[in-house]
Image (cartoon, grey):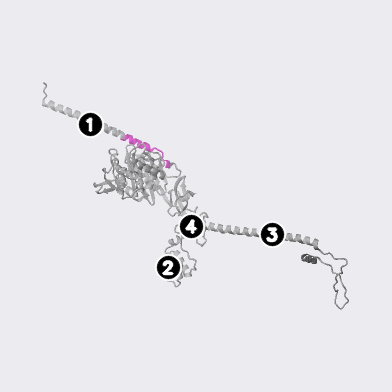
Amino acid sequence: MKLYSPLQKIWKKLGISILAFSLAVSFLAAPITAQAGGTVDLMQEMENRKALPIQSNEIENWPQGPQVGAQSAIVMEANTGTILYSKNIHEPLYPASTTKILTCLVASEHSTLEEMVSFSHEAVFSLEYGSSNMGMDVGQSITMEEALYGILVGSANEVANAVAEHIGGSIEGFAAMMNQKAEQLGCMNSHFVNPSGLHDDNHYTSAYDLAVIARSFYQNELLAKMSGTPTRHFKPTETQPDDFILRTHHKLVTNEYPFEGIIGGKTGYTSTSRQTLVTCAERNGMKLVCVVMKEESPNQFTDTINLLNYGFSNFSMVNVSENETRYNIDHADFFQTNNDIFGSSKPILTLDQKSCIVLPRTASFEDATSSISYEVEKERQIARIDYTYQGVYIGNAAIHLVENTVSPYDFEKISETEAETGEEAESGINTRNNQETDNSTITEAAPEISTKKEAEQEPIFINIKKVLLLILSVAGFLILLFFGKALIQSYSFSSKNSRERRKQQRRGVSRRRYRRRPLSTEVPRYRPSSSEDKPRKYIPVEEDEEDEEEMDIFF
């Protein structure tokens, strides 16, 4: 038997330890090296994506936008729908958890905040391992309001599933509602199969479609508020026993990346989709929606900041009613005449006072091209003026009937004192309540006018259609009356002429049949030639034609 000295035993243990340590280092170093290699590849892909063309930069006289590492990106003005920046905006990509803005939009339209949402076994346990959740258990329930906060702040996938089952009956049924809503909003390259955004080859959308959905989403004040909430405290209830706080992952909302005017947003990530981000911000009346898809962290946030700054720095909102002269209501017969039949010059049609378009700061309103469209759906809207700049749609202005057009109008004579009071009111001097008048008809004849603005907003409404129909009806009646009279007169003259012709024919026959001729033996008739004291001298008298006619008539 071989014996080892104590020193040899020490060296042996030391060698075994070194060998074990070497094996351990080798084992751990392999994944780290692979991960490092993978990170290098991802960063290289991001750099390659920066070289992709930016379509909006190809527009003549359009502000040049920044290069970003996202595969697809868009900046859209939410009020007008104007696209300020576009890079591969129609390419179908995987949206990950940004899907949830559509989930919450559909849920808000088909539920109330007080409804209770219960969690089924399918909703809780159908998730992938490690996916985001807020720890809800089967059988628990929360209000719809808490559920929406859980989805938008904590990106909780089991809550999205529970909401889908509550509203759509099943996840598949709710997905059908999502697709229907997307189509209604005008999405062109989208298809959704679940409410959470977990990866599925048939679950995709585009940056443009996601911006269209976000535009509708941020018109809902409650949803906008929820998406801009950094943290949400959930307190225990009878149906949910836990006390916990959720925190959003959107670093512009948490102010880790400070940004002026931030409203809210939604993050998204899967290993396939990479980083996706939807953000909304507002400055000086301009509300921008920014979407970046397939980016690497943390560049989804820096890209968003650069794109939003590009939009706010290079574009501005321009009010149409304050600048439009080509369709000026006071000069265009298309809108109205100068005065209505009561002598009022107030318009019946007007441009929407709130309508704005988006223009580059280097362009003026006169550089925009306009066209009128009569395909409108809103009540009281007559037409719409669409505006473009360099072929890019930049907004529209509605032409509609003036509201509050029915105003009292007294045709009684108004005294001079009242007229003067009315003029002072129109000049912005509200002295009617401070003056006393001896004429009692002043108060009865006209209502009080408090401000010039209120006076200007009381046009007299004339129903042109009814007026025209009335005029046409009266004109038609008069025409029929005229032709009737002419027809009766024509018939009367015809009958009279016929009777005259028959009468003349009878006269001719009577002359031939009954005319008496003088006899040779008849003693001629004489008449005295002068006075009676002279001897009578008889002069024969011949019958004239008038006597014959009288005789004819007699016979």
| Residue holding disc 3 | 495
Q: Nearer the viewer, residue 286 or 514?
A: 514
SS label for mark 2: helix
Q: CA distance from mark 4 to mark 1?
A: 84 Å
| Residue holding disc 1 | 25
Q: Nearer the viewer, mark 2 or mark 1?
A: 2
Task: Say what amino acid the circle numbered 4 marks.
Answer: Ile
**Earlier along the polypeptide chain: callout 2 or callout 4?**
4
| Residue holding disc 2 | 432
Q: CA distance from mark 2 to mark 4?
A: 28 Å
Q: Is residue 434 visible?
A: yes
Pinpoint residue 550: horizontal percent, then vertical percent: 78, 66
Magenta range is: 39-56
Badge 2 local density, few (<14 within 10 Å), some, or many (20+)?
A: some
Q: Nearer the viewer, residue 269 or 428?
A: 269
| Residue holding disc 4 | 348
Residue at x 42% of width, y 68% of height: 432
SS label for mark 1: helix
Task: Say what amino acid the circle numbered 3 marks.
Answer: Ser
Image quarter of residue 122? top left
